[in-house]
Image (cartoon, coloured by chain):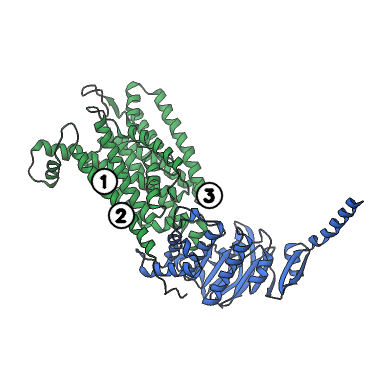
Chain colours: A blue, B green
Amino acid sequence: MILTVNNVSFSYASTPVLENVDFHVDPGEILAIMGPNGAGKTTLLKCVNAIHRPSSGAVMVDGTDVLRLTAEQTARRVGYVAQKTETGNMTAFDAVLLGRKPHMRWRVSENDLRIVEAAIRHLGMEHLTMRTLDHMSGGEVQKVAIARALVQEPRILILDEPTSALDMKNRTEILGMIGHVVREHGMAAVVTLHDVNQALRFADRFIFLRDRTIFAAAKRGEVTAEMIEGVYGLPVVLGEVNGLPVVVPADETIRPHKHDHTETMLDQ
Amino acid sequence: MHFADGQVPEEYRRHTARRTWMVAAAGVGLVAVLGYALSMGAAQLSLSAVFRALAGLGVEPRVNTIVWNIRLPQALAAILAGMALSSSGAVMQSVLRNPLGSPFTLGVTHAAAFGAAISVMLLGSGTMHSTGGDAVVISNPYATTTAAFAMSMVATFVVLGVSRLRSASPEAMVLTGVALGSLFTAGTMFLQYFADDVQLAAMVFWTFGDTARADWAELAVIAGVTLPALGFFLYNRWNYNAIDAGDETAKGLGVRVERVRLFGMLVAALVTSVVTAFLGVIGFVGLVCPHMVRRFTGDDHRFLLPGSALFGGLLLLTADTAARLMLAPHALPVSVLTAFIGAPMFLWLVMRGRRS
């Protein structure tokens, strides 16, 4: 187990946001945290890398309580890709180099530079090396953010909605890339995703957050329509297309009938 | 992670070398303009005479006096003030996440002017001498300076205090700064309305930023604050880069964002207050200079900060020398010139966008 979240609760001021959340992640494993907006997904991620301090419970990284680590020590173990990355007049290489900050002393070392180049190459974005972030598309900026988290050489990667601003091709590409890196390096990843279909294909395990706590947990292939219905409060149909799991809101299935009806009316 | 097979791209090395050279060029330019500034004036001195005076090799006492007592203090005041204002502007732009960040944004300079006005009005530190030209003299410069400094620190702490309530949010800092700026301006106008002719003249005169005011003792204070502040800014260069990438990203990299923001603002405000208290209000350098440097170095604070400091010193020294020589034998206060050059330059930067 790389990451253990033990009965974590968290409150903003006196409003409880998370209550008794409990899970763990193994090396090479991707865990998706799912749930409706405001369920506490982002808050949970921030507890994992100690940006937030849980009001009770503990987050253990490789057996060490994160609250016992300095911010810098945490940053060497946990890489965080935030929901939003700001751009500016900074080359991709320098933007990724920033990820070496937790390892740096006064000067940037040759080793830092080499790691940055290798990470950029592993993610297949050499052509972007010298381009500045303000001249990149949303997908390219997202890749830079992921490369930045990777050069932190973390044990755990946390990604908050890494695909929310991306088109279908970029989504598939970036999730594939994350999956590849995590499995190859025996890291663990915790990801929040809104797109249930993407999540079902991408993650190894799922936890569904509702009303501040874990509503259901499942492995890949064990997710049921009832779990999704229960957490999002929406009837769904869970099926398979070419062996891939597919979820659609059940309402949608009613529409063709309406459509038929309209056509019939027009025919008359 | 196995990223040991990396090869640093040549293109990146060239890019880094280019940025280093640009910073170095600003330094060389600064030394060149300094030589020119010391030799030019009512009495023309040769560069070799200036050099010999600086090196303490026997020159006639008149040259020695001109270089050491008149021109060098003024030139150093211009360089230090340019460095302080420009690097503070660069840091404020980063930690406030706002391209309009500058000592003006916080109301620091307005507060200093108000402090000076209070000192003139209540402590009677302004008088008018009509002997040597129509010079208005602040008869007690230390009272005025102290009052200006105290008031700008009051402004700084109010801004930081209010933003602390809102967990050091940059929006709260900017909005509080703007509100305080207009409050202090109103306060100054109130005092000016009730001031007599002499006091009014002294208040207005004080707000003209003028590098000729500094003597060696004051220069020592300015340098004693500015140089450690520059060191502090440079020490935090990666923290500012991280904050530029977004607060959440920075926190994920182990940066204590609120702390870096508070201390960055505090130190930037402190150096600005000291410079303003001794020399008066010098506008636009803090705002425009970092933006000019960004065009060449990008937003990377490893290069932006030393570049802004050196270029700020270069720009203010050039403006100051021009202001001395343009309308000779009258020496224009440098703040008039910086505002005249700064505003069109800023417009030009806005319209050109940045070089891609």
> What's the chain of the residue with tag 2?
B
User: Circle 3 — which element?
Assistant: loop
Quarter-of-image position of residue B89? top left
Quarter of the rendering occupied by the N terminus of chain A: bottom right
Q: Amino acid at mark 1?
A: Leu
Q: Which residue is mark 3?
A: B166
Discs 3/1, front: 1
Q: Are marks 2 and 3 on the same chain?
A: yes
Discs 2/3, front: 2
Q: Is residue B173 above or below residue B253?
A: above
Residue B42 position in % (x across, y down)? 18, 31
Specify few, some or many for label 1: CA neighbours under 10 Å numbering under 14, 14-19, or 20 or more.
many
Q: Residue furthest front?
A: A267
B39 sits to left or right of A73: left
**Mark seen at residue B21:** 2
Residue A256 position in % (x across, y down)? 83, 59
User: Circle 2 — which element?
Assistant: helix
Q: Amino acid at mark 3?
A: Arg
> How far apart are the two marked residues, 2 and 1, measured between alpha carbons?
14 Å
N-terminal-most mark, 2 or 3: 2
N-terminal-most mark, 3 or 1: 1
Instruction: Look at the image and tell me whether residue B215 can be seen.
Output: no
